[in-house]
């Protein structure tokens, strides 16, 4: 079975597991350069106020004029490192790496079609439209960090923590037009317990928690790919009337999570 991988990087563990599977041929790793929509300074300013608040926004503005790296610059460096690691692993296994500016460009679509893939694995990208995910013969599958259909969208783990869930889900599903609504192939759950040594710095906790999920995510996707290759796999329809599609939390919602974490900590004392 011919597979293509669409990723922004961080796919080393998945590639290592896929290459061990029999009858699986990774014919290309497609890495997209575009990681965020192009926005004007005014649009970025408004979004920052909405999601980060006044204090953080003005701090970011000041840092633009100081000889220090901003959070955005650090994030870009991290993404660049993850891409390079993915490229290195692919090269080690003689897997072609194709860098494209945007998955939805004419050039990219033509390259995807030329791969003649049976299936695409989407692993850490922006939202991919039907003109792309429908190219492979069997369609595309996606790894979603959330227990669909109850938790669709993102960001992963934040809303489960917000709602005081005791576990989070990992879902491998076929890609459909609406975000995280495609037929489910595999799911599993992982215990979620907040580490109060982080106090209310939930961002650091989430970063660590997500990092620790990488192995489980790679294993689940690898297992789903093998099931598809054998032809023995379920396609469980989602009832999208259950749960909801979550979106980026507003500054007020981030503050509310901190308040809830403080309240939960008091209960433990």
Image (spheres, helix red, strand yellow):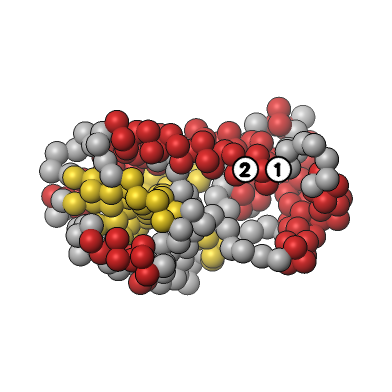
Number of the label disc, if any, that sits on residue 20: none
Which residue is at a point 76% across and 58% down the rendered structure image? Answer: 48
Within 10 Å of disc 1 (Cα), the crowding (few <14, some 14-19, many 20+) is few
Observer-nearest residue: 88 or 242?
Answer: 88
Q: Is residue 105 above or below residue 22?
A: below
- C-alpha span from label 1 to label 2: 6 Å
Number of the label disc, if any, that sits on residue 71: 1
Count the marks: how many? Answer: 2
Q: Secondary structure at mark 2?
A: helix
Q: Give percent across and percent down for residue 36.
A: 58, 58
Quadrant in the picture for residue 84: top left
**Circles 1 and 2: CB distance less than 8 Å?**
yes
Quadrant in the picture for residue 25: top left
Q: Is residue 222 left or right of residue 123?
A: left
Q: Residue furthest top?
A: 197
Which residue is at a point 57% across and 47% down the rendered structure image? Answer: 157
Observer-nearest residue: 57 or 67?
Answer: 67
Mark 2, residue position: 75
């Amino acid at each position: 079975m011919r597979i293509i991988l669409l990723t922004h990087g961080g796919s080393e563990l998945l590639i290592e597991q896929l290459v061990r599977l029999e009858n699986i041929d990774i014919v290309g790793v497609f890495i997209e350069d575009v990681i965020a929509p192009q926005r004007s300074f005014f649009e970025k300013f408004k979004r920052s106020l909405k999601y980060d608040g006044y204090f953080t926004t003005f701090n970011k503005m000041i840092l633009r004029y100081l000889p220090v790296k901003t959070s955005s610059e650090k994030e870009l460096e991290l993404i660049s490192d993850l891409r390079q690691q993915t490229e290195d692993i692919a090269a080690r296994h003689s897997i072609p790496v194709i860098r494209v500016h945007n998955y939805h460009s004419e050039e990219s679509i033509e390259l995807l079609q030329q791969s003649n893939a049976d299936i695409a694995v989407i692993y850490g990208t922006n939202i991919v439209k039907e003109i792309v995910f429908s190219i492979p013969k069997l369609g595309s599958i996606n790894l979603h960090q959330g227990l669909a259909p109850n938790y669709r969208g993102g960001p992963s783990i934040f809303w489960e923590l917000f709602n005081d869930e005791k576990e989070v889900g990992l879902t491998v599903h076929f890609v459909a037009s609406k975000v995280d609504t495609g037929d489910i192939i595999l799911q599993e759950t992982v215990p979620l317990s907040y580490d109060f040594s982080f106090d209310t710095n939930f961002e650091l906790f989430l970063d660590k928690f997500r990092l620790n999920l990488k192995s489980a995510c790679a294993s689940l996707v690898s297992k789903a790919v093998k099931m598809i290759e054998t032809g023995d796999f379920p396609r469980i329809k989602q009832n999208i009337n259950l749960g909801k599609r979550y979106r980026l939390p507003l500054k007020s919602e981030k503050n509310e999570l901190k308040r809830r974490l403080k309240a939960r900590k008091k209960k433990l004392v």
